[in-house]
């Protein structure tokens, strides 16, 4: 199994994100699999503070 880089999504609901991921051509044709993991950041770099809302 080969892992790829994580992506960060914000300002979206889990159901909407899952739909978008499922519609990705690579996911839809089973070229890759995707796993969505929800996190609650407790310590972030100041350069990405705007993502926390």
Image: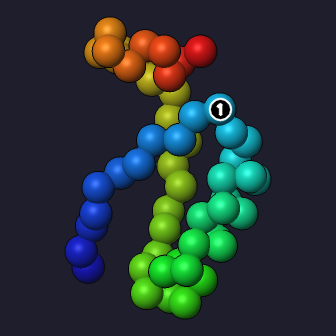
Q: Name the residue that disc number 1 marks.
A: 11
Q: Residue furthest top?
A: 46
Q: Is residue 8 left or right of residue 19?
A: left
Q: Residue furthest front?
A: 25
Q: Residue at x 27, y 67 (%)?
A: 3
- As displayed, is residue 10 above or below residue 5? above
Q: Residue at x 48, y 15 (%)?
A: 50
Q: Quadrant of residue 43?
A: top left
Judging depth in this view, the residue of 13 and 43 nearest the camera is 13
Q: Quadrant of residue 20?
A: bottom right
Disc 1 element: loop
- As displayed, is residue 6 above or below residue 27? above
Return the x and y of residue 23 as percentages of the image width and height. 65, 73
Judging depth in this view, the residue of 43 and 19 nearest the camera is 19
**Label 1: how many Cα within 10 Å (few below 14, some 14–19, many 20+):** few
Q: Residue at x 57, y 34 (%)?
A: 10
Query: Could you tell me which quadrant the C terminus lies in?
Result: top right
Return the x and y of residue 36 as percentages of the image width and height. 53, 55
Q: Is residue 15 left or right of residue 1?
A: right
Return the x and y of residue 19 as percentages of the image width and height. 71, 63
Query: Could you tell me which quadrant the N terminus lies in?
Result: bottom left
């Amino acid at each position: 199994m080969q892992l790829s880089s994580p992506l960060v999504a914000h300002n979206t609901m889990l159901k909407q994100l899952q739909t978008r991921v499922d519609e990705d051509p690579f996911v839809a044709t089973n070229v890759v699999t995707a796993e969505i993991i929800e996190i609650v950041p407790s310590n972030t770099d100041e350069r990405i503070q705007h993502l926390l809302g």
